[in-house]
Amino acid sequence: MSDKKIPYKIYLAESEMPETWYNLRADMVHKPAPLLHPVTHQAMTAQELSAVFCDELVRQELDNDTREYPIPQEIRDFYKMYRPSPLVRAYCLEKKLQTPAKIYYKFEGNNTSGSHKLNSAIAQAYYAKQQGLVGVTTETGAGQWGTALSMACAYFGLDCRVFMVKVSYEQKPFRREVMRTYGASVTPSPSESTRVGRSILAAHPGTTGSLGCAISEAVETAAAHPGYRYVLGSVLNQVLLHQSVIGLEAKAAMDKYGIKPDVIIGCAGGGSNLGGLIAPFMGEKLRGEADYRFLAVEPASCPSLTRGVFAYDFADTGMVCPLAKMYTLGSDFIPAPNHAGGLRYHGMSPILSQLYDDGYLEAVTVPQTRVFEAAEQFARVEGILPAPESSHAICAAMDEALRCRETGEEKTILFGLTGTGYFDLVAYQKFHDGEMTDYVPSDEELAASFAKLPKVE
């Protein structure tokens, strides 16, 4: 099909929206390793996990075999407020780069929460409501997950308690206020309100926090309040299941116009958006039906895949959560306070970690200033101010397109634009004022963190 027949924005009809989530684990030869109890190091049972998570989410977390999960009608009705989301052909960016490559991006920022996070937030809130819970607790980095969950909880009438990484709490006050507008309480983490928060502050005075710290506080708070459960916005199998709606829509839109991507790119922090985007394409690759190249893009300041180790580690800094086998920098690692707060997590999704270890997924890192250079160029030609997290994928996609200009290859590139950056203007200001720096952890820093990994036999 000629380019002239492909519109700038490809919209699916409401009736074409996916009716099921796709469970990528069903097609993986090597399944993600089981979660282990933090004390006994035995595989966690459904009963043990149900003390922390909602019952239905536990079932989804442990199910490596069911390929498709029906999306409940109430969730599908909510999705219809902002889904299907558009697949956009970046004609203007292609022209600016003078590349023969064709560039597409799946735009997930067209909802009030401003990101893809709402896809799983509404599902997790729904199951909490179905279970008769009073409320949920969670952590948030940049604030996109906290915003999405507070919106979902308001919809279902649930209490929402958010622990926001301290550096983002201070850098992004407007994201915090959106959460409060939806009725959530927002606490900077680490805080004095939990035992684990106080211990982290004692060990790391003046720390800017991390997602691992905030997770510990949220889990402790949920355990201390009857009728509450903890919910997580990334990393877990259940979250990647819900986020598969991104890739399912993207693939349906591309199939509609006979488009096949050569390379699929996403930013990677915990893995939710990348895992969701690549899911159906990776499924085809695993089943031998098609071939694609997959690229995860990490911040150079928090390089879990590219410089981490594949080992069992705590999902949180306070070491109260189950152990997950993943590429990790160590749960004690506290990343530099960069502005892509949603990517400041020490580990990577067990699903993506296994795929990376098996050679199905590539990974690169990008320093912060290059990310914002790419973000600014994208904003000027495509008219969307991207989130810092998404801009990692933009940077890598542009690099790929420029290589095509040099080689003359006419590759088709698909990347995920996870959300907008209108609450990240402090970061853009620092970039424009020349106050932004690039930080890369030393081998010595990482080695010290790796030395503290739990000994699992």
Image (tube, helix red, strand yellow):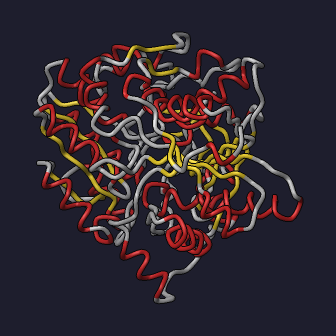
Residue 33: x percent and y percent?
59, 24
233 relative to 252, above or below: below
Q: Nearer the viewer, residue 51 or 195?
A: 51
Up/down of 237 relative to 328, above or below: above
Q: Residue at x 62, y 64 (%)?
A: 93
Residue found at x 19% / y 45%: 161
State which quadrant residue 49 falls in: top left
Q: Is residue 328 above or below residue 246?
A: below
What is the quadrant of the N terminus in the image?
top right
In this view, the residue in front, 328 or 403, is 403
Quadrant assignment, res 247: top right
Image quarter in which the C terminus is found: top right
**Which residue is most to the front?**
4
Task: Give percent across and percent down for residue 444.
Answer: 67, 65
User: Is residue 192 or residue 268 the one in the foreground?
Assistant: 268
Give 240 or 108, whichever is nearer the viewer: 108
Residue located at (46% from left, 89% from top): 433
Q: Is residue 3 left or right of residue 203?
A: right
Residue located at (60% from left, 26% from top): 280
Query: Where residue 174 sits: x, y (%)?
Result: 24, 66
User: Where residue 64 appears, x then y in whole percent?
Assistant: 54, 15
Name, please, the residue furthest toward the right: 407
Residue 268 visible at all: no
Residue 445, relative to residue 119: is it above or below?
A: below
